[in-house]
Image (cartoon, helix red, strand yellow):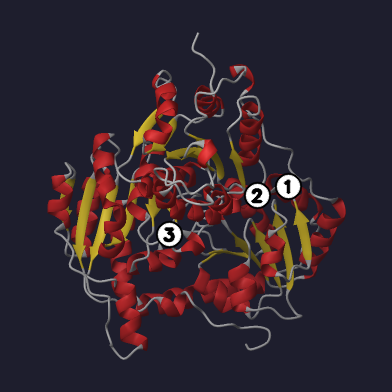
Amino acid sequence: MTAQTIASLAVDSLIANGIDTLYCVPGVQNDAFFDALYHRRDRLTPVHARHEQGSAYMALGAALATGQPQAVSVVPGPGFLNASAALATAHSLNAPVMALVGQIPSGTIGRATGQLHEIDGQFEILGKFTKHAEHVADGARAPAQLTDAWRALRSGRPQPVGLEIPVDCWLKPTDYDRGTLAVPARATPVPKADQLDAAARAIRAARCPMIVVGGGAHAHAANVRALAHRLGAGVVAYRTGHGVMPASDALSLTNPAGHALWRDCDLVIGLGTRLATQTVAWGLDAAMTVVHIDIDASAFRSSDATTVAVHADLADALPALLDVLGEQPDRSAWCARIAAVKATTANAIADTLAPQLAWLDAIRQALPADGVLLDELTQIGFVSRFAFPVTAPRQFLSTGYQGTLGWGIAAAIGAAHARRDVPVVSITGDGGALFTITELATAVHHRIPVNIVVMNDNAYGNVKGIQRDHYGGRYIASDLTSPDFVALAESFGATGARAETPDALSDALATAVASPDVNVIEVPVGEFPSPWPYILMPKLRGTGA
């Protein structure tokens, strides 16, 4: 029987809690852990990346695409810091990522002795990017610490959890039973009857209701749709709630359409969202009632204007709310107003942003209805957040408010690895592409079918567009010299193609998504009209509106 150590405990704990893939970059501080993993490769497969940021973005992409916990392992110091942007993004996107981070010898931590990969305060930094972190250095305490970590990962609002293990502690003996390593979630907060009754009263009094959904609503799409149709309420998604309401639904609203209706709205219901964009950026006044339902009570502080707060899991709160809603007023006039504003807004966007829409239409035509699209901080990516239609949750993945330039290729590889049943497409610019394009080597090595569309304008296009529109064309630090992306893709063993028109992109992408290969399509483009009037929209209500 293999000796039980902290290393074997970490491996067995990952397996017991449903992790079958470890996105990773190995290194000397974690050698003992990987040696323990060697004997369990039939249950836990390492997908080793070419850079720590790539491995962490892969875990993030897999978590977003599936809604299930994923794991990443990196060495300490520079390795951990390389992964930290992805962990910060996972924290903001409600992504359940378990991060195993190595550490220098336990006796040297904080002593500034110049150990390999030493940084001061690593554990404290890890705590900033996770909702729960454990420093695992004692074999007797280790099983309980891992139980606490998994319970935190599985409970409440999904966010990353971190484990830091010093190099000299991996082989410390411990004692555990494999059969008890699977950890259930804590009980969720139960919706209180008085809160539900207050919410129902507020809803019945409303004539012009709106629902805003975020990433926390993905698992509850059916009940969200039932609530929307019961109320005649438009449903707004900005970056992370797309697909909760199918884009084809008459009550589905893009963010610009939601903004156009905001001045008339008398009730907003926030579901699995901070509501910050609407209540802070668009503004509130005394005529607006806010009903906010979330599993995380801290979300209520984000809007700082909640009239009725229901602290509960949407899985419990939405059915209970539907049961007590009672008879609703006639909102047919509001539904007609929603339809009219949707049409007007869509026409304005079509007139203003026709070049971006042509490329997005080409992608939509080629991508099957169940496919997954990842956006990026590129002109096409910005517009996709309000102009790319999807039909179900987790079909549109975004960096959310972190705006993490360069995440797209590596995150798409993780999403494609975790969702081999559907095609995955990443849209990126030539600026962001070079952050993690080295991970094409990882995709080829592990035979992960992923499709990358690179919009190449040889610039940080968004920076250059802002300099054009707001700084008199005084261009600085925005032009780029980019590679031949077709040749670069082929040098990795991927399939490369170039598309110079939307029709050509549609044809090339249709061929790509039908193949099991790693595909890169370069799209040479020029300047685009600014999407920002439809993203940073003005305050409509309250002081300063």
How packed mark 1 is, by other alpha carbons closer than 10 Å (few <14, some 14-19, many 20 or more), is some
Horizontal side of 71 relative to 373 (left or right) equals right
In this rendering, position of residue 181 left or right of residue 316? left
For marks 2 and 1, the one nearer the N-term is 2
Secondary structure of the residue carrying numbered label 1? helix
Considering only vertical position in the picture, is 267 above or below 450? below
Q: Quadrant of residue 49?
A: top left
Count how many numbered circles sit on residues in the image: 3
The answer to whether any part of residue 528 appears in the image is: yes
Extreme residue in the bottom direction: 472
Q: CA distance from mark 2 to mark 3?
A: 20 Å
Answer with the quarter of the image where residue 37 lies: top left
Residue type highlighted by circle 1: Pro
Q: Which residue type does callout 2 highlight?
A: Asn
Q: Which mark is residue 223?
A: 2
**For residue 269, side relative to residue 327 (left or right):** left
Q: Which residue is mark 3?
A: 389
Q: Secondary structure at mark 2?
A: helix
Frontmost residue, 109 versus 244 = 109
Q: Which residue is mark 1?
A: 319
Residue in the foreground of this view, choosing between 122 and 308? 122
Labels 2 & 1 near each other (Cβ < 8 A): yes
**Among the two numbered marks 2 and 3 on one chain, the one whose residue lies closer to the N terminus:** 2
Query: Farthest residue in the right direction?
Result: 194
On the image, the x and y values in percent for residue 461 come to 29, 73
Q: Tag 3: residue type? A: Pro
Q: Is residue 120 above or below residue 531?
A: above
* Distance between the alpha carbons at the discs numbered 2 and 1: 7 Å
Residues marked 1 and 3 touching at CB (< 8 Å): no
